[in-house]
Image (spheres, grey):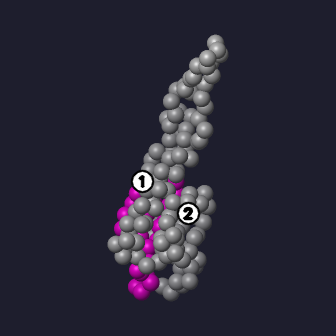
Amino acid sequence: MIWVVNANSTICRIYNYSKKPSQLVLLKELLHPESRIKASVDLTSDKPGHYQTQHSSHGSYGAHTDPHAVEIDKFSRQIAVELEHGRTQGLYKQLILISPAHMNGNLGLHLNKHVKELVTHHLHKDLLNINENDLLDFIHSNTRYPEK
């Protein structure tokens, strides 16, 4: 039982991958449209927070983190929870992760050691725009599962 996770910062598709017969079956699609929102307009408030000191001076707080990065981090956590649930249910024994490098790094921060031990391949590509047949071809040419 092999799962293929094809993700970027806004969409994650989880497939069951069979080597014989060679096929991908979509199990679940997770969406996180908040990761697309422009940070300057939609993710932050209009003005920074303000504070007052004991003297007559005032100041303001700026955002310490990029709101867009916070949303990507939230989505990475959501994917990690889904993968942990699948592991504890015994739904897969091996995992292939396909995602851009920055998303793969975020996922790595949130996957627990048990899930990480099941990852057989980290493929650093954004392949959400290709069809399942092309994705299957990509998996065959980039993993140790070449048979069709």
Instruction: Check disc 2 and report its element: helix, strand or loop.
Output: helix
**Magenta segment, which residues?**
1-30
Q: Is residue 2 visible?
A: yes
Residue positioned 50% across, 87% down in the render: 147
Residue extending furthest toward the top = 56
Q: State the residue in front, 62 or 144.
A: 62
Question: For mark 1, what is the residue?
Answer: 31
Question: For mark 2, what is the residue?
Answer: 108
Q: In the picture, which quadrant includes the N terminus?
A: bottom left
Residue 114 falls inside the magenta stretch = no
Number of numbered discs = 2
Amino acid tagged 2: Gly
Residue positioned 37% across, 71% down in the render: 88
Q: Is residue 24 visible?
A: no
From the top left corner, tell me how far across and down residue 68 is, in percent. Answer: 55, 44
Would you say the magenta stretch is mainly helix, strand or loop?
A: strand
Q: State the residue in front, 93 or 50.
A: 50
Amino acid tagged 1: Leu
Residue 114, numbered label: none
From the top left corner, tell me how far across and down residue 90 is, in percent. Answer: 36, 76
Residue positioned 60% across, 38% down in the render: 64
